[in-house]
């Protein structure tokens, strides 16, 4: 099934556009002549407007039928399996490493959800989300790709991120082991580190877990994670409940659950 996009629809839109342009031009002239008390031009412009409105009225019913037919056919396409294939093709062509299947897709740190019944598409990062009512694949794909690039092309400040991880690690390390000094190399759950970094509700809203995981993935792509005299180890796990799923820029997946920081000699 293909979306409705033929010469008949384009002709109807073009004809209505032309009629509305003539009406707008005539109404502009009429308003100016009325304000200027240009009686002759006022009378002529009003007569011209009446003629244009009559012509549009005579043709409108036929053009409306064409446009409503186009809407119905496009809606049927959106409800079909072909629509999902078209969306996935557009997203992949845009360079988005999309995973999942219609109506729910993921490409870290985003989730893309289609709600055909309610007539919207939602793009979310954690609890933050945006919606659009536009379902056309090309337009939708351009919107999603634009939002995606804003995040993945943003500068990643690894030094700042490591400072934040180090600060949280030191505090949780001493609290967990109930001692005054840090036990370097001791593993601390990353989920606990994220909770500490976002203790305030406002912080959690500004820095949702999905973005934290995305930053971990970008950090992990470095061959050696070092800051100052510290070595960072993101330790793997097979337990989904206690770990974060990281997806790197090549689409490769790995699970990490804890962070160990070592003091280098």
Image: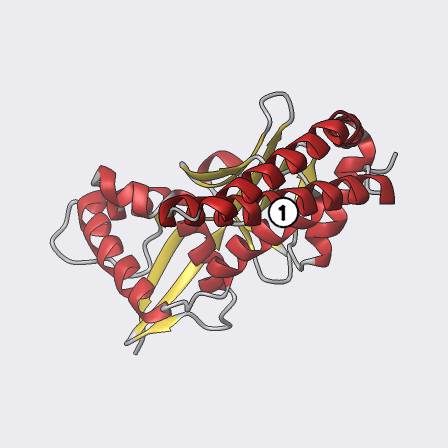
Residue at the limit of the structure toward the bottom, as seen here: 265
Residue at the limit of the structure toward the left, as seen here: 180
Give percent across and percent down for residue 112. 58, 39
Tell me what residue is drawn at x 38 percent, y 46 percent. 37
Give percent across and percent down for residue 151. 47, 58
The residue lying toward the viewer, choosing from 102 and 179, is 102
Question: Quarter of the image containing the N terminus?
Answer: top right
Tell me what residue is drawn at x 49 percent, y 48 percent. 28
**Quarter where residue 198 is shown:** top left
Residue at the limit of the structure toward the front, as seen here: 40
The crowd level at tag 1 (other Cα within 10 Å; few <14, some 14-19, many 20+) is: some
Give percent across and percent down for residue 209. 39, 44
Residue at the limit of the structure toward the top, as seen here: 117
Give percent across and percent down for residue 260. 36, 57
- Can the viewer see residue 237 in this picture? no
- Can the viewer see residue 119 in this picture? yes
**Quarter where residue 225 is shown:** bottom left
Tell me what residue is drawn at x 24 percent, y 51 percent. 173
The residue lying toward the viewer, choosing from 187 and 97, is 97
**Quarter where residue 251 is shown:** bottom right
Name the residue that disc number 1 marks.
22
Describe the element under mark 1 as helix, strand or loop.
helix
239 relative position to 156: left or right: right
Tell me what residue is drawn at x 33 percent, y 60 percent. 185
The residue lying toward the viewer, choosing from 9 and 50, is 50
47 relative position to 81: left or right: left
50 relative position to 168: left or right: right
Question: Quarter of the image containing the C terminus?
Answer: bottom left
């Amino acid at each position: 099934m293909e979306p409705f996009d033929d010469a008949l629809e384009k002709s109807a839109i073009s004809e209505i556009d032309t009629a509305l342009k003539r009406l707008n031009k005539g109404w502009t002239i009429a308003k100016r002549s009325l304000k200027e008390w240009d009686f002759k031009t006022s009378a002529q412009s009003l007569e011209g407007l009446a003629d244009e409105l009559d012509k549009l009225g005579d043709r409108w019913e036929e053009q409306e039928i064409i446009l409503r037919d186009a809407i119905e056919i496009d809606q049927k396409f959106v409800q079909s399996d072909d629509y999902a294939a078209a969306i996935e093709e557009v997203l992949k062509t845009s360079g988005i490493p999309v995973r999942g299947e219609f109506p729910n897709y993921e490409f870290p740190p985003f989730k893309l959800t289609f709600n055909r019944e309610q007539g919207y598409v939602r793009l979310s990062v954690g609890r933050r989300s945006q919606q659009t009512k536009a379902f056309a694949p090309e337009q939708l794909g351009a919107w999603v790709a634009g939002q995606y690039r804003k995040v993945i092309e943003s500068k990643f400040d690894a030094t700042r991120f490591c400072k934040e991880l180090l600060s949280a690690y030191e505090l949780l390390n001493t609290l967990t082991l109930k001692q005054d000094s840090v036990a370097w190399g001791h593993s601390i759950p990353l989920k606990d580190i994220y909770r500490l970094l976002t203790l305030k509700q406002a912080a959690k809203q500004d820095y949702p877990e999905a973005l934290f995981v995305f930053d971990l993935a970008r950090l992990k792509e470095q061959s050696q994670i070092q800051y100052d005299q510290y070595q960072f180890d993101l330790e793997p796990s097979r337990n989904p409940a206690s770990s974060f799923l990281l997806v790197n820029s090549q689409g490769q997946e790995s699970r990490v659950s804890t962070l160990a920081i070592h003091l280098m000699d």
